[in-house]
Protein backbone atom coordinates (compact mmCIF):
# COMPACT_ATOMS: atom_id res chain seq x y z
CA UNK A 1 0.00 0.00 0.00
CA UNK A 2 1.32 3.45 -0.97
CA UNK A 3 2.22 5.70 1.95
CA UNK A 4 1.62 9.43 1.74
CA UNK A 5 2.48 12.46 3.83
CA UNK A 6 0.73 12.17 7.24
CA UNK A 7 -1.76 14.88 8.10
CA UNK A 8 0.23 16.08 11.10
CA UNK A 9 3.25 16.57 8.84
CA UNK A 10 1.15 18.59 6.40
CA UNK A 11 -0.15 20.74 9.28
CA UNK A 12 3.38 21.26 10.60
CA UNK A 13 4.70 22.19 7.15
CA UNK A 14 1.92 24.72 6.67
CA UNK A 15 2.74 26.40 9.99
CA UNK A 16 6.37 26.71 8.94
CA UNK A 17 5.41 28.22 5.59
CA UNK A 18 3.11 30.77 7.20
CA UNK A 19 5.77 31.72 9.72
CA UNK A 20 8.39 32.11 6.99
CA UNK A 21 6.16 34.30 4.85
CA UNK A 22 5.56 36.68 7.75
CA UNK A 23 9.32 37.27 8.00
CA UNK A 24 9.36 38.73 4.49
CA UNK A 25 12.14 36.37 3.46
CA UNK A 26 10.58 35.36 0.17
CA UNK A 27 10.01 38.96 -0.92
CA UNK A 28 13.75 39.43 -1.36
CA UNK A 29 14.58 39.27 -5.08
CA UNK A 30 17.93 37.68 -4.27
CA UNK A 31 16.14 34.81 -2.49
CA UNK A 32 13.79 34.36 -5.42
CA UNK A 33 16.62 34.25 -7.95
CA UNK A 34 18.58 31.82 -5.79
CA UNK A 35 15.63 29.46 -5.53
CA UNK A 36 14.95 29.61 -9.27
CA UNK A 37 18.57 28.67 -9.91
CA UNK A 38 18.20 25.81 -7.45
CA UNK A 39 15.21 24.62 -9.47
CA UNK A 40 17.47 24.55 -12.51
CA UNK A 41 20.08 22.47 -10.72
CA UNK A 42 17.46 20.11 -9.33
CA UNK A 43 16.46 19.09 -12.84
CA UNK A 44 19.91 19.44 -14.42
CA UNK A 45 21.57 17.18 -11.85
CA UNK A 46 18.82 14.57 -12.07
CA UNK A 47 17.97 14.59 -15.76
CA UNK A 48 18.48 10.84 -16.18
CA UNK A 49 16.44 10.11 -13.06
CA UNK A 50 13.55 12.13 -14.47
CA UNK A 51 13.84 10.39 -17.85
CA UNK A 52 13.75 7.02 -16.10
CA UNK A 53 10.76 8.02 -13.95
CA UNK A 54 8.81 9.22 -17.00
CA UNK A 55 9.66 5.96 -18.76
CA UNK A 56 8.33 4.01 -15.78
CA UNK A 57 5.13 6.02 -15.46
CA UNK A 58 4.26 6.71 -19.10
CA UNK A 59 6.60 4.55 -21.20
CA UNK A 60 7.99 7.75 -22.70
CA UNK A 61 11.01 7.76 -25.00
CA UNK A 62 13.87 9.88 -23.62
CA UNK A 63 13.66 12.30 -26.57
CA UNK A 64 9.95 12.91 -26.02
CA UNK A 65 10.47 13.43 -22.29
CA UNK A 66 13.18 15.99 -22.99
CA UNK A 67 11.08 17.74 -25.65
CA UNK A 68 7.71 17.72 -23.87
CA UNK A 69 8.56 17.86 -20.16
CA UNK A 70 12.17 18.26 -19.01
CA UNK A 71 13.41 20.64 -21.70
CA UNK A 72 10.35 22.82 -21.33
CA UNK A 73 10.95 23.12 -17.60
CA UNK A 74 14.61 24.02 -18.11
CA UNK A 75 13.77 26.67 -20.70
CA UNK A 76 11.04 28.13 -18.52
CA UNK A 77 13.18 28.50 -15.41
CA UNK A 78 15.95 30.20 -17.40
CA UNK A 79 13.42 32.69 -18.78
CA UNK A 80 12.17 33.37 -15.23
CA UNK A 81 15.71 33.99 -13.98
CA UNK A 82 16.49 36.30 -16.90
CA UNK A 83 13.29 38.36 -16.53
CA UNK A 84 12.79 38.32 -12.76
CA UNK A 85 13.47 42.01 -12.17
CA UNK A 86 11.41 43.08 -15.19
CA UNK A 87 8.37 40.94 -14.38
CA UNK A 88 8.28 41.89 -10.69
CA UNK A 89 8.95 45.61 -11.12
CA UNK A 90 6.35 48.20 -10.17
CA UNK A 91 4.06 49.23 -13.02
CA UNK A 92 3.48 52.92 -13.64
CA UNK A 93 -0.12 53.62 -14.70
CA UNK A 94 -1.06 56.40 -17.09
CA UNK A 95 -2.50 58.35 -14.17
CA UNK A 96 -2.19 61.93 -15.37
CA UNK A 97 -0.31 64.83 -13.80
CA UNK A 98 -1.73 64.90 -10.27
CA UNK A 99 -1.94 61.14 -9.55
CA UNK A 100 1.00 60.16 -11.72
CA UNK A 101 3.57 62.96 -11.50
CA UNK A 102 2.60 64.53 -8.18
CA UNK A 103 1.29 61.44 -6.39
CA UNK A 104 3.91 59.04 -7.81
CA UNK A 105 1.21 56.43 -8.48
CA UNK A 106 2.50 52.93 -9.04
CA UNK A 107 1.24 49.35 -8.89
CA UNK A 108 3.28 46.96 -6.77
CA UNK A 109 3.22 43.22 -7.38
CA UNK A 110 2.85 41.76 -3.91
CA UNK A 111 3.11 37.99 -3.25
CA UNK A 112 -0.20 36.42 -2.26
CA UNK A 113 1.27 34.48 0.66
CA UNK A 114 1.24 30.71 1.13
CA UNK A 115 0.06 28.99 -2.05
CA UNK A 116 -0.89 25.40 -2.89
CA UNK A 117 0.13 23.95 -6.26
CA UNK A 118 -1.49 20.70 -7.40
CA UNK A 119 0.14 19.00 -10.40
CA UNK A 120 -1.30 16.36 -12.69
CA UNK A 121 -0.06 13.13 -14.23
CA UNK A 122 0.14 13.65 -18.00
CA UNK A 123 3.12 15.99 -17.61
CA UNK A 124 4.13 15.21 -14.04
CA UNK A 125 7.17 17.47 -14.07
CA UNK A 126 6.00 20.47 -16.11
CA UNK A 127 2.59 20.82 -14.45
CA UNK A 128 4.16 21.03 -11.02
CA UNK A 129 7.43 22.91 -11.67
CA UNK A 130 6.28 25.61 -14.09
CA UNK A 131 3.70 26.98 -11.63
CA UNK A 132 6.35 26.66 -8.89
CA UNK A 133 8.70 28.91 -10.89
CA UNK A 134 5.97 31.54 -11.20
CA UNK A 135 5.10 31.33 -7.50
CA UNK A 136 8.77 31.67 -6.49
CA UNK A 137 9.29 34.60 -8.86
CA UNK A 138 6.27 36.33 -7.30
CA UNK A 139 7.71 35.84 -3.80
CA UNK A 140 5.37 33.26 -2.29
CA UNK A 141 5.82 30.36 0.09
CA UNK A 142 4.73 27.12 -1.57
CA UNK A 143 3.19 23.78 -0.71
CA UNK A 144 3.33 21.57 -3.81
CA UNK A 145 1.70 18.20 -4.37
CA UNK A 146 2.63 16.10 -7.41
CA UNK A 147 0.09 13.71 -8.88
CA UNK A 148 -0.14 10.33 -7.15
CA UNK A 149 -1.06 8.64 -10.45
CA UNK A 150 2.53 8.84 -11.71
CA UNK A 151 4.19 7.28 -8.68
CA UNK A 152 7.80 7.23 -9.89
CA UNK A 153 7.77 10.94 -10.72
CA UNK A 154 5.95 11.76 -7.49
CA UNK A 155 8.56 9.96 -5.38
CA UNK A 156 11.43 11.60 -7.25
CA UNK A 157 10.06 15.12 -6.79
CA UNK A 158 9.33 14.35 -3.13
CA UNK A 159 12.94 13.25 -2.64
CA UNK A 160 14.61 16.10 -4.50
CA UNK A 161 12.65 19.18 -3.40
CA UNK A 162 14.01 19.25 0.19
CA UNK A 163 17.55 18.57 -1.09
CA UNK A 164 17.56 21.58 -3.43
CA UNK A 165 14.98 24.11 -2.30
CA UNK A 166 14.59 26.15 0.89
CA UNK A 167 12.48 23.94 3.18
CA UNK A 168 11.43 26.89 5.29
CA UNK A 169 9.53 28.29 2.30
CA UNK A 170 8.87 25.40 -0.10
CA UNK A 171 7.47 22.03 0.95
CA UNK A 172 6.44 18.98 -1.08
CA UNK A 173 3.63 16.76 0.19
CA UNK A 174 2.03 13.65 -1.30
CA UNK A 175 -1.42 12.17 -1.16
CA UNK A 176 -4.32 10.50 -2.91
CA UNK A 177 -7.90 11.80 -3.04
CA UNK A 178 -8.46 11.37 0.72
CA UNK A 179 -5.24 13.14 1.71
CA UNK A 180 -5.81 15.89 -0.84
CA UNK A 181 -9.28 16.53 0.58
CA UNK A 182 -7.73 17.07 4.01
CA UNK A 183 -5.12 19.42 2.55
CA UNK A 184 -7.88 21.44 0.90
CA UNK A 185 -9.53 21.98 4.27
CA UNK A 186 -6.58 24.20 5.19
CA UNK A 187 -6.53 27.89 4.40
CA UNK A 188 -4.23 28.94 1.57
CA UNK A 189 -3.81 32.33 -0.06
CA UNK A 190 -4.09 30.86 -3.56
CA UNK A 191 -4.59 27.43 -5.11
CA UNK A 192 -3.18 26.53 -8.52
CA UNK A 193 -4.60 23.34 -10.02
CA UNK A 194 -4.00 21.48 -13.27
CA UNK A 195 -6.36 18.64 -14.13
CA UNK A 196 -9.90 17.75 -15.15
CA UNK A 197 -12.89 20.06 -14.81
CA UNK A 198 -14.52 17.48 -12.50
CA UNK A 199 -11.73 17.79 -9.94
CA UNK A 200 -11.53 21.54 -10.57
CA UNK A 201 -15.08 21.86 -9.27
CA UNK A 202 -14.03 20.16 -6.03
CA UNK A 203 -11.02 22.47 -5.75
CA UNK A 204 -13.19 25.55 -6.37
CA UNK A 205 -15.75 24.50 -3.77
CA UNK A 206 -13.05 23.94 -1.15
CA UNK A 207 -11.40 27.27 -1.99
CA UNK A 208 -14.70 29.13 -1.79
CA UNK A 209 -15.10 28.22 1.88
CA UNK A 210 -12.09 30.42 2.65
CA UNK A 211 -12.62 32.91 -0.21
CA UNK A 212 -9.31 31.64 -1.62
CA UNK A 213 -8.48 32.67 -5.16
CA UNK A 214 -7.72 29.95 -7.69
CA UNK A 215 -6.07 29.33 -11.02
CA UNK A 216 -7.68 26.31 -12.66
CA UNK A 217 -5.96 24.83 -15.72
CA UNK A 218 -8.35 22.25 -17.14
CA UNK A 219 -8.95 20.90 -20.63
CA UNK A 220 -11.99 20.28 -22.75
CA UNK A 221 -13.11 18.72 -25.99
CA UNK A 222 -10.79 20.69 -28.27
CA UNK A 223 -12.27 20.81 -31.80
CA UNK A 224 -10.32 20.93 -35.03
CA UNK A 225 -11.94 22.47 -38.10
CA UNK A 226 -10.57 21.38 -41.47
CA UNK A 227 -12.00 23.43 -44.35
CA UNK A 228 -11.97 22.72 -48.07
CA UNK A 229 -9.11 25.21 -48.57
CA UNK A 230 -6.72 23.44 -46.19
CA UNK A 231 -3.50 21.73 -47.27
CA UNK A 232 -4.88 18.25 -46.59
CA UNK A 233 -1.62 16.30 -46.58
CA UNK A 234 0.10 18.74 -44.20
CA UNK A 235 -3.03 18.94 -42.05
CA UNK A 236 -3.19 15.15 -41.71
CA UNK A 237 0.52 14.94 -40.88
CA UNK A 238 0.28 17.51 -38.09
CA UNK A 239 -2.88 16.02 -36.60
CA UNK A 240 -1.59 12.43 -36.70
CA UNK A 241 1.71 13.42 -35.09
CA UNK A 242 0.08 15.44 -32.33
CA UNK A 243 -2.36 12.66 -31.46
CA UNK A 244 0.60 10.31 -30.96
CA UNK A 245 2.42 12.64 -28.56
CA UNK A 246 2.09 11.35 -25.00
CA UNK A 247 -0.42 8.82 -26.41
CA UNK A 248 -2.88 11.66 -26.90
CA UNK A 249 -2.94 12.40 -23.17
CA UNK A 250 -2.61 16.18 -23.49
CA UNK A 251 -5.25 18.65 -22.37
CA UNK A 252 -4.59 20.71 -25.51
CA UNK A 253 -4.78 17.84 -27.97
CA UNK A 254 -7.33 17.63 -30.77
CA UNK A 255 -10.39 15.83 -29.43
CA UNK A 256 -12.42 15.60 -32.65
CA UNK A 257 -12.33 16.90 -36.20
CA UNK A 258 -14.99 18.74 -38.16
CA UNK A 259 -14.08 17.89 -41.77
CA UNK A 260 -15.70 19.70 -44.66
CA UNK A 261 -17.68 17.13 -46.72
CA UNK A 262 -15.71 18.00 -49.87
CA UNK A 263 -12.36 16.92 -48.35
CA UNK A 264 -13.57 14.43 -45.70
CA UNK A 265 -12.58 11.23 -47.52
CA UNK A 266 -9.22 12.58 -48.63
CA UNK A 267 -8.43 13.69 -45.07
CA UNK A 268 -9.28 10.25 -43.65
CA UNK A 269 -7.01 8.53 -46.18
CA UNK A 270 -4.14 10.94 -45.48
CA UNK A 271 -4.55 10.41 -41.72
CA UNK A 272 -4.26 6.66 -42.27
CA UNK A 273 -1.15 7.18 -44.38
CA UNK A 274 0.54 9.35 -41.77
CA UNK A 275 -0.39 7.00 -38.93
CA UNK A 276 1.31 4.21 -40.89
CA UNK A 277 4.42 6.33 -41.44
CA UNK A 278 4.70 7.69 -37.90
CA UNK A 279 3.45 4.74 -35.83
CA UNK A 280 4.04 1.45 -37.64
CA UNK A 281 7.49 0.11 -36.83
CA UNK A 282 8.01 2.75 -34.13
CA UNK A 283 5.73 1.21 -31.49
CA UNK A 284 8.60 0.87 -29.01
CA UNK A 285 9.00 4.67 -28.94
CA UNK A 286 5.34 5.36 -28.27
CA UNK A 287 4.12 6.42 -24.82
CA UNK A 288 1.51 4.26 -23.13
CA UNK A 289 -1.72 5.09 -21.35
CA UNK A 290 -1.06 5.99 -17.73
CA UNK A 291 -3.09 3.20 -16.07
CA UNK A 292 -5.29 0.20 -16.76
CA UNK A 293 -8.25 2.24 -15.52
CA UNK A 294 -7.67 4.77 -18.28
CA UNK A 295 -7.22 2.01 -20.88
CA UNK A 296 -10.60 0.63 -19.80
CA UNK A 297 -12.18 4.08 -20.09
CA UNK A 298 -10.95 4.48 -23.67
CA UNK A 299 -12.06 0.97 -24.55
CA UNK A 300 -15.56 1.70 -23.24
CA UNK A 301 -15.73 4.79 -25.43
CA UNK A 302 -14.79 2.71 -28.47
CA UNK A 303 -17.18 -0.09 -27.58
CA UNK A 304 -20.07 2.37 -27.34
CA UNK A 305 -19.43 4.32 -30.53
CA UNK A 306 -21.92 4.20 -33.40
CA UNK A 307 -19.24 5.45 -35.77
CA UNK A 308 -17.08 3.43 -38.15
CA UNK A 309 -13.63 2.41 -36.92
CA UNK A 310 -11.57 3.18 -40.01
CA UNK A 311 -8.14 2.61 -38.49
CA UNK A 312 -7.03 0.67 -35.43
CA UNK A 313 -3.85 -0.64 -33.90
CA UNK A 314 -2.46 -2.26 -30.77
CA UNK A 315 -4.53 -2.16 -27.61
CA UNK A 316 -2.98 -4.14 -24.75
CA UNK A 317 -4.37 -3.66 -21.27
CA UNK A 318 -1.45 -5.37 -19.51
CA UNK A 319 1.23 -3.10 -20.97
CA UNK A 320 -1.21 -0.16 -21.34
CA UNK A 321 -0.22 0.22 -25.01
CA UNK A 322 -2.93 1.93 -27.04
CA UNK A 323 -2.22 2.79 -30.66
CA UNK A 324 -3.86 5.41 -32.91
CA UNK A 325 -7.50 4.86 -33.81
CA UNK A 326 -9.64 6.74 -36.34
CA UNK A 327 -13.44 6.72 -36.12
CA UNK A 328 -15.63 8.30 -38.82
CA UNK A 329 -19.37 8.87 -39.17
CA UNK A 330 -19.46 10.31 -35.65
CA UNK A 331 -22.06 12.78 -34.40
CA UNK A 332 -22.05 15.00 -31.33
CA UNK A 333 -24.18 12.50 -29.36
CA UNK A 334 -21.70 9.66 -29.82
CA UNK A 335 -20.06 7.95 -26.82
CA UNK A 336 -16.68 9.21 -28.05
CA UNK A 337 -17.86 12.76 -27.41
CA UNK A 338 -19.52 12.08 -24.05
CA UNK A 339 -16.34 13.34 -22.40
CA UNK A 340 -12.84 14.50 -23.27
CA UNK A 341 -11.19 11.56 -25.08
CA UNK A 342 -7.69 12.16 -23.66
CA UNK A 343 -6.13 9.41 -25.72
CA UNK A 344 -5.02 8.49 -29.27
CA UNK A 345 -8.57 8.11 -30.61
CA UNK A 346 -9.57 10.57 -33.32
CA UNK A 347 -13.28 11.13 -33.93
CA UNK A 348 -14.18 12.68 -37.29
CA UNK A 349 -17.44 14.52 -37.97
CA UNK A 350 -18.48 15.48 -41.49
CA UNK A 351 -19.53 19.15 -41.27
CA UNK A 352 -19.21 22.47 -43.05
CA UNK A 353 -17.40 25.26 -41.19
CA UNK A 354 -20.72 26.94 -40.30
CA UNK A 355 -22.08 23.66 -38.94
CA UNK A 356 -18.85 23.25 -36.96
CA UNK A 357 -19.12 26.73 -35.45
CA UNK A 358 -22.66 26.02 -34.33
CA UNK A 359 -21.72 22.66 -32.77
CA UNK A 360 -18.76 24.18 -30.93
CA UNK A 361 -20.90 26.89 -29.39
CA UNK A 362 -23.59 24.34 -28.44
CA UNK A 363 -21.01 22.30 -26.48
CA UNK A 364 -21.07 23.06 -22.73
CA UNK A 365 -18.15 25.29 -21.92
CA UNK A 366 -15.55 26.72 -24.34
CA UNK A 367 -12.60 24.38 -25.06
CA UNK A 368 -9.02 25.02 -23.99
CA UNK A 369 -7.84 25.01 -27.60
CA UNK A 370 -9.43 25.55 -31.01
CA UNK A 371 -7.67 24.52 -34.23
CA UNK A 372 -8.45 25.77 -37.73
CA UNK A 373 -6.87 24.42 -40.90
CA UNK A 374 -7.59 26.81 -43.76
CA UNK A 375 -5.86 28.95 -46.38
CA UNK A 376 -8.77 31.38 -46.59
CA UNK A 377 -8.47 34.50 -44.41
CA UNK A 378 -12.24 35.04 -44.39
CA UNK A 379 -12.79 31.48 -43.12
CA UNK A 380 -10.20 31.99 -40.40
CA UNK A 381 -11.62 35.35 -39.31
CA UNK A 382 -15.14 33.91 -39.20
CA UNK A 383 -13.94 30.98 -37.08
CA UNK A 384 -12.32 33.40 -34.62
CA UNK A 385 -15.39 35.63 -34.39
CA UNK A 386 -17.92 32.76 -34.22
CA UNK A 387 -16.34 30.69 -31.43
CA UNK A 388 -14.82 30.90 -27.96
CA UNK A 389 -11.81 29.05 -26.57
CA UNK A 390 -8.83 29.42 -24.28
CA UNK A 391 -6.50 29.84 -27.26
CA UNK A 392 -6.27 29.21 -31.00
CA UNK A 393 -3.68 27.71 -33.33
CA UNK A 394 -4.23 28.18 -37.05
CA UNK A 395 -2.87 25.46 -39.37
CA UNK A 396 -1.34 23.64 -36.43
CA UNK A 397 -2.16 22.28 -32.99
CA UNK A 398 -1.27 23.37 -29.44
CA UNK A 399 1.36 25.92 -30.54
CA UNK A 400 -0.41 28.89 -28.94
CA UNK A 401 0.56 27.47 -25.53
CA UNK A 402 4.22 28.03 -26.34
CA UNK A 403 4.09 31.68 -27.42
CA UNK A 404 6.64 33.61 -25.30
CA UNK A 405 5.30 36.34 -23.01
CA UNK A 406 1.69 35.37 -23.80
CA UNK A 407 -0.97 34.02 -21.43
CA UNK A 408 -2.02 30.38 -21.46
CA UNK A 409 -5.28 29.32 -19.85
CA UNK A 410 -8.88 28.32 -20.38
CA UNK A 411 -12.25 29.97 -20.08
CA UNK A 412 -15.33 28.60 -18.36
CA UNK A 413 -15.17 24.81 -18.07
CA UNK A 414 -11.69 24.73 -19.61
CA UNK A 415 -10.26 26.78 -16.78
CA UNK A 416 -10.00 30.07 -14.96
CA UNK A 417 -7.01 32.36 -14.97
CA UNK A 418 -3.81 32.05 -16.97
CA UNK A 419 -0.07 31.81 -16.57
CA UNK A 420 3.25 31.46 -18.49
CA UNK A 421 5.92 34.14 -18.43
CA UNK A 422 4.89 37.44 -16.81
CA UNK A 423 1.29 36.21 -16.58
CA UNK A 424 2.44 33.50 -14.17
CA UNK A 425 3.93 36.12 -11.87
CA UNK A 426 0.67 38.07 -12.04
CA UNK A 427 -1.33 34.92 -11.23
CA UNK A 428 0.56 34.60 -7.94
CA UNK A 429 0.60 38.32 -7.15
CA UNK A 430 -1.73 40.94 -5.74
CA UNK A 431 -1.61 44.16 -7.75
CA UNK A 432 -1.37 46.77 -5.02
CA UNK A 433 -1.89 50.39 -6.04
CA UNK A 434 0.21 52.91 -4.11
CA UNK A 435 0.07 56.72 -4.16
CA UNK A 436 1.92 59.36 -2.11
CA UNK A 437 -0.19 62.50 -1.57
CA UNK A 438 1.86 65.58 -0.60
CA UNK A 439 0.73 67.99 2.12
CA UNK A 440 0.83 71.03 -0.12
CA UNK A 441 -2.08 69.59 -2.14
CA UNK A 442 -4.34 70.88 0.67
CA UNK A 443 -4.02 74.35 -0.87
CA UNK A 444 -5.59 73.02 -4.07
CA UNK A 445 -8.06 70.50 -2.68
CA UNK A 446 -9.48 72.29 0.36
CA UNK A 447 -12.85 72.66 -1.36
CA UNK A 448 -13.41 68.84 -1.17
CA UNK A 449 -13.86 68.95 2.64
CA UNK A 450 -17.03 69.61 4.60
CA UNK A 451 -18.91 71.89 4.59
CA UNK A 452 -19.57 71.62 0.83
CA UNK A 453 -20.34 74.81 -1.10
CA UNK A 454 -22.64 75.04 -4.10
CA UNK A 455 -20.24 77.38 -5.93
CA UNK A 456 -17.78 74.46 -6.21
CA UNK A 457 -20.31 72.20 -7.96
CA UNK A 458 -18.78 72.96 -11.36
CA UNK A 459 -15.56 71.32 -10.19
CA UNK A 460 -17.23 67.91 -9.76
CA UNK A 461 -19.80 67.93 -12.58
CA UNK A 462 -18.62 65.87 -15.57
CA UNK A 463 -19.46 67.17 -19.06
CA UNK A 464 -19.40 65.42 -22.47
CA UNK A 465 -17.83 68.48 -24.14
CA UNK A 466 -19.38 67.57 -27.48
CA UNK A 467 -17.41 64.35 -27.96
CA UNK A 468 -20.59 62.58 -29.04
CA UNK A 469 -24.21 63.58 -29.65
CA UNK A 470 -27.55 62.36 -28.35
CA UNK A 471 -29.40 60.06 -30.74
CA UNK A 472 -26.35 58.47 -32.36
CA UNK A 473 -26.79 54.98 -33.79
CA UNK A 474 -24.40 52.15 -34.53
CA UNK A 475 -23.71 53.55 -38.01
CA UNK A 476 -22.44 56.81 -36.49
CA UNK A 477 -19.65 55.18 -34.52
CA UNK A 478 -16.04 55.75 -35.58
CA UNK A 479 -13.62 53.02 -34.54
CA UNK A 480 -9.97 53.93 -34.05
CA UNK A 481 -7.56 51.60 -35.78
CA UNK A 482 -4.98 50.15 -33.43
CA UNK A 483 -2.15 47.67 -33.63
CA UNK A 484 -0.13 47.19 -36.81
CA UNK A 485 -2.31 49.38 -39.00
CA UNK A 486 -3.00 52.24 -36.57
CA UNK A 487 -0.95 54.95 -34.90
CA UNK A 488 1.22 52.24 -33.36
CA UNK A 489 2.56 51.38 -36.81
CA UNK A 490 3.64 54.97 -37.41
CA UNK A 491 5.41 55.06 -34.05
CA UNK A 492 7.07 51.71 -34.70
CA UNK A 493 8.29 52.76 -38.14
CA UNK A 494 9.56 56.08 -36.79
CA UNK A 495 11.42 54.33 -34.00
CA UNK A 496 12.77 51.76 -36.44
CA UNK A 497 14.16 54.44 -38.76
CA UNK A 498 15.78 56.15 -35.78
CA UNK A 499 17.39 52.92 -34.58
CA UNK A 500 18.58 52.17 -38.12
CA UNK A 501 20.13 55.63 -38.37
CA UNK A 502 21.97 55.16 -35.07
CA UNK A 503 23.18 51.77 -36.27
CA UNK A 504 24.55 53.24 -39.50
CA UNK A 505 26.32 55.97 -37.54
CA UNK A 506 27.92 53.43 -35.21
CA UNK A 507 28.94 51.30 -38.17
CA UNK A 508 30.60 54.30 -39.80
CA UNK A 509 32.55 55.00 -36.61
CA UNK A 510 33.78 51.42 -36.49
CA UNK A 511 34.89 51.58 -40.14
CA UNK A 512 36.87 54.73 -39.39
Image (cartoon, rainbow, N blue to C red):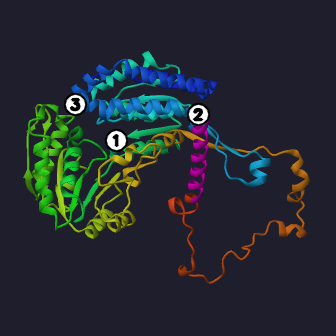
Q: Say which element carries label 1.
A: loop
**Residue that mark 2 sits on:** 510
| Marks 1, 3: nearer the viewer | 3
- Dominant secondary-structure state across the stretch colored magenta: helix
Question: In the image, is residue 187 part of the stretch drawn in magenta?
Answer: no
Q: Position of residue 428 (x, y in %)?
A: 52, 38
Whether residue 498 is in magenta: the answer is yes
Within-10-Å neighbours for mark 1: few <14, some 14–19, many 20+: many
- Magenta extent: 490-512
Relative height, residue 132 to residue 34 (above, below): below
- Asked if residue 455 is positioned above or below residue 450 in the image, the reply reads below
From the image, state whether disc 2 or disc 3 is nearer to you.
Answer: 2
Quarter holding the C terminus is top right
Q: x, y (%) of residue 301?
A: 15, 50
Asked where in the image residue 461 lies, by quadrant, the reply is bottom right
Whether residue 3 is visible, yes or no, is no
Is tag 2's residue or tag 3's residue first in the polypeptide sequence?
Answer: 3
* 280 sits to left or right of 109: left
As rendered, which of 136 and 421 lies closer to the eye?
Answer: 421
The picture quadrant where one finds residue 42 is top left
Q: Distance from label 2 to label 3 (Cα)?
A: 53 Å
Query: Which mark is on residue 195?
Result: 1
Q: 240 left or right of 130?
A: left
Spot occupied by residue 439 in the image (x, y as percentages of width and height)? 87, 45
Question: Which residue is at the far bottom?
Answer: 471
Name the residue rendered at 54%, 42% in the picture: 426
Amino acid sequence: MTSYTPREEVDSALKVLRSTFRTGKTKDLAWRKWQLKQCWWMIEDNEKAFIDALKTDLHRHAFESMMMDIGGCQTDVLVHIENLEKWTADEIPDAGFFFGTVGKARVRKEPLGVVLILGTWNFPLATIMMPVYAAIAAGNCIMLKPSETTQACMRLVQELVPNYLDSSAIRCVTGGPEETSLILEQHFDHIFFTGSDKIARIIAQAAAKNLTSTTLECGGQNPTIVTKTADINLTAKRIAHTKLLNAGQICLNANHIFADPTIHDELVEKLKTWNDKLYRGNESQMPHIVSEKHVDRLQRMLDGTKGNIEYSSTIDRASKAFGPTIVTNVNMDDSLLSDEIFGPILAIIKATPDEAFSSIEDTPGPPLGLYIFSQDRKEIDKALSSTRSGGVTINGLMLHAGVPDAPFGGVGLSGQGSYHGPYGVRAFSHLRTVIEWPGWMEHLMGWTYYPFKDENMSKVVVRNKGKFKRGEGIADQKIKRTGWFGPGLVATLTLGVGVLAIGVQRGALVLR
